[in-house]
Amino acid sequence: MNGSKLRGPRVAIFGMDGLIIIKGWRKRDMSNLIATRTNEGAAAHKVPFVSYGVTRAAGEVMTGHFGHTGHEAVGGDNIFRIASMTKPIVTMAALQLVEAGKLDLHAPAKNILPMLGEVDVLVGEAAADMKTVGLARDITLHHLLTHTSGYAYDFHSDKIMAQVQAGKVPPLAVDNNDFLRAPLISQPGDNWEYGIGVDFVGQMIEAVSGQDLETYLREMIFEPLSMTCTSFRASVVGADKIVPLGARSADGTITDLTAMMPLIDSPPYSGGGGLYSNVTDYMKFMRVLLNGEQGPSGRILGADGVHMMQTNQIGDLLVPLQPTMNEMLCSEHEWFPGVINRWSYGLLINESDVPGRRKAGSCAWSGLNCTYFFVDPKSDIGGVVMMQMLPVYNPASLSVFEAFEKAIYETDL
């Protein structure tokens, strides 16, 4: 890759049932390759529609869209449920408040949310026969942001799923707020386990800012970055623009789940998920991770905060294979077997190059409805793919994401 600048007008090209928007004439061949590989991957794997985009620190390189929602061709106006891709944005908000002296990474979180000092920890070998003990140490904001607090999702943890099946904890999908009463599966700081920690971070942001999470994010992140299509509120982004959500079977059949997923338009808002967005808006956030993207009033996060989101914050702990306890929601998945994966504040970090794909030190994450993104600071490139189907990490969605990412690295950007 080289550092060529974006030049020339914005170009729209139609092809293979897809629309490609390119920033600059010199990028046409590159964008055609990315679009062709992505669109072909979606068609081959029976993915009904996908939006995708590529960005540099200097700005958007291209966006593309393929397929139909069932009512219309998907395009730049469409909005996606980005689920856990909310977490990195909320993490950035928390780090803003750390910079402002309103939050402390290493102080007991119970000072702000007393319930975090009253949590039980599961112990024992058999998931169905666990005992509980008290906290050995306080939960901190650091633990919550790095998924080392001991909190876990029911669809990843057999221990928490056993609690759900025993009626001790409601399923996350049924009652997100009551699920926050779940016990820990390990003591804070002992292990990495993907879970509900960032939900509590959202509550901490609300407590110290005096604003609900929607208002804080709008004033401190969305408006400064001109992210006009991102919100927790469906009415803000336009409910009629939100694409349908489907469940994908092994044979590629899609069952519409939209009626089972009511749109959000009022509090409470979840720090762990719930935002609506699109590829163009999300790339504006990604550029903060590439260059500390500035809004009209300056940088929205200082260099130290950006660095903490780009680098390992869990020491020698590893991000392991993520099992599934609910195959309707997620498939078992391990990011890049053979590559050491760590966690920053908010993001997955791969410690070595991924052949044909991102370089060492890239940061990335995903959302439950098959939205995926990565940012590669060494190569000055980032990419985002948005589909809208369950389960996350299903092979079809991962194949489309891989085809998209590999095409980026085949081009001379």
Image (spheres, rainbow, N blue to C red):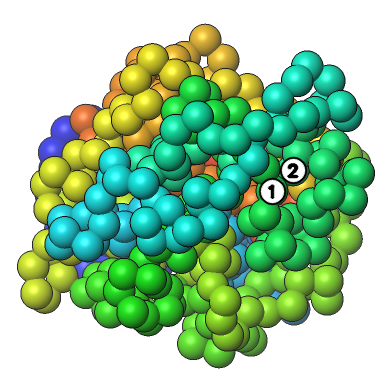
Residue 48: quarter of image: bottom right
Check disc 2: other Cα within 10 Å, few if <14, some if 14-19, many if 20+: many
Q: What residue appears at the point 51 percent right and 51 percent down from the top-left corner?
A: 116
Which residue position is annotated with label 1? 182
Q: Horizontal placement of 341 versus 244: left or right?
A: left
In the picture of the structure, the residue carrying the numbered disc 2 is: 154
Quadrant in the picture for the N terminus: top left
Of the residues under marks 2 and 1, which one precedes in the sequence?
A: 2
Residue type of the residue flagged with mark 1:
Ala
- Residue furthest out toward the left: 298
Residue 363 visible? The answer is no
Describe the element under mark 2 as helix, strand or loop.
loop
- Contact? badges 2 and 1 (CB < 8 Å): yes
Q: Position of residue 215 (x, y in %)?
A: 37, 81
The residue drawn where x is 81% and y is 56% is 170
Image quadrant where residue 218 sits: bottom left
Q: Decide which of 90, 36 is in the foreground and name it.
A: 90
Would you place residue 155 above or below residue 115 in this image?
above
When asked about the image quadrant of residue 265, the answer is: bottom right
Which residue is at the front of the view, 17 or 177?
A: 177
How far from the left and from the top, in percent, is residue 125? 78, 17
Residue 396, x across and y down, in percent: 72, 39
For residue 125, above or below residue 106: above
